[in-house]
Amino acid sequence: MTWLDLPPDTGFGVANLPYGVFSTDGTAPRTGVAIGDFVLDLAGATGEAVHATGSLNAFLARGSAEWARLRRRLTEWLTDPAHRSAVEPHLVPRPAVTMHLPIEVADYVDFYSSQHHAENLGRMFRPGSPPLTPNWKHLPIGYHGRAGTVQVSGTPVVRPSGQRLADGVPVFGPSARLDIEAEVGFVVGTPSSLGVPVPVSDFAEHVFGVCLVNDWSARDLQAWEYVPLGPFLGKSFLTSVSPWVVPLAALDAARIDPPDRDTDLLPYLDDTKARWSLDLTLEVRLNGSLVSSPPFGLLYWTAAQQLAHLTINGANLRTGDLYASGTVSGPERDQRGSLIELSWGGAEPLTLPDGATRTFLEDGDVVSITATAPGPDGSRLSFGEVLGRVEPAR
Ligand SMILES: O=C(O)/C=C/C(=O)CC(=O)CC(=O)O
Ligand SMILES: [Ca+2]
Ligand SMILES: [Mg+2]
């Protein structure tokens, strides 16, 4: 129990305590923790410089023992009324804050771990070939994205321009197939050494927490450019993340077994002793209407396996590395995490409640992705929101 008067169904109770970076009018960005309708100002409440840097990186670099220590301290502050008078002055109403990019993103990697998504895209991008490539069930496929264009929720999505094929001829102009990808992101705190792979079992030593990701994608640019090296300009113009990073430590009640796998794994990907599927339900809204509820728990590959794969060649981790799950899609139409799937390549437009139809995004459209996960005692934890509004091409 907490001495705070929390809204009944708040997803930001004492079992959550996600971290972000915020400012209020005219003050410098600093670290805060969401609690109910407030942000607890950690720079003020702890007096520690590590929380006044304007990003979570310095704190994340301290490692998992320090993350656990601060979490215990915060829980005590917010539950023991003896701390009320010291803590209360550092609570800022959430409507009064501006949220910033929570981490200084080091490297950014995007995986491709939803079998439903991969099969759907395979059918559309590579008709006539098997929907899954032969490697898909042997390794979590991914690519390196552009860390510098990872931005916080609310950053406008300027429609990208580039090359696409029109009647078999490359033309230049604004993308006509601007899309979303509903994903879950994992934030690395503890670095690793060059040359030393990180085993599946060390996942929680290195990964601090989880955020929401929208991997904006220009499907027409992507389709023309991606063979043979993979996504490039069709995805590097912007990737949006939610402002709150939910610590792995908050997700005990959300851990579930991964789906059955029908292909033997090489030992470095064996996760029988570190089951890290998470029972998150995402919700995708287009101009306020719910268009999809992708089930994260069905992903074939877990974030622990992705981390092991990412480092198996000796690549080192750095504080602030961000890797995303890949688009989350389930078996049902209303569980697909992208518009290219929801509209089946544009052939089956979506009808919104106001009668408007959509295949891909139009200028002015607003896309929001939210998620919740089971918390202790039947509660739900909120991941907040990642939102973006489409602006015309420049
Ligand atoms: O199958 C393809 O060629 C393309 C796939 C994607 O666009 C998906 C991607 O960015 C990875 C993912 O989000 O799952
Ligand atoms: Ca993606
Ligand atoms: Mg992107």
Image: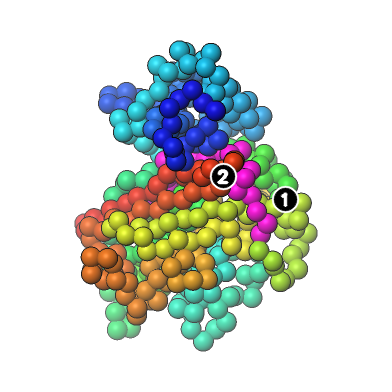
Q: Quadrant of the C terminus?
A: bottom left
Residue 64 appears in view: yes
Tell me where residue 376 sits by quadrant.
top right
Residue under label 1: 274
Which residue does the numbered mark 2 point to in the structure image?
378
Q: In the rendering, which numbered label is found on residue 150?
A: none
Residue 93 on image: x %, y %: 34, 28
Residue 72, position as x, y percentages in the image: 61, 26
**Does residue 297 belong to the magenta stretch?**
no
Write down the region rendered in magenta: 239-258
Give the secondary structure at mark 2.
helix
Left or right: 348, with 119 as reference point: left
Of the residues shown, which amino acid type is indicated by label 1? Ala
99, 316: nearer the viewer: 99
**Would residue 257 be counted in the magenta stretch?**
yes
**Circle 1: element type:** loop
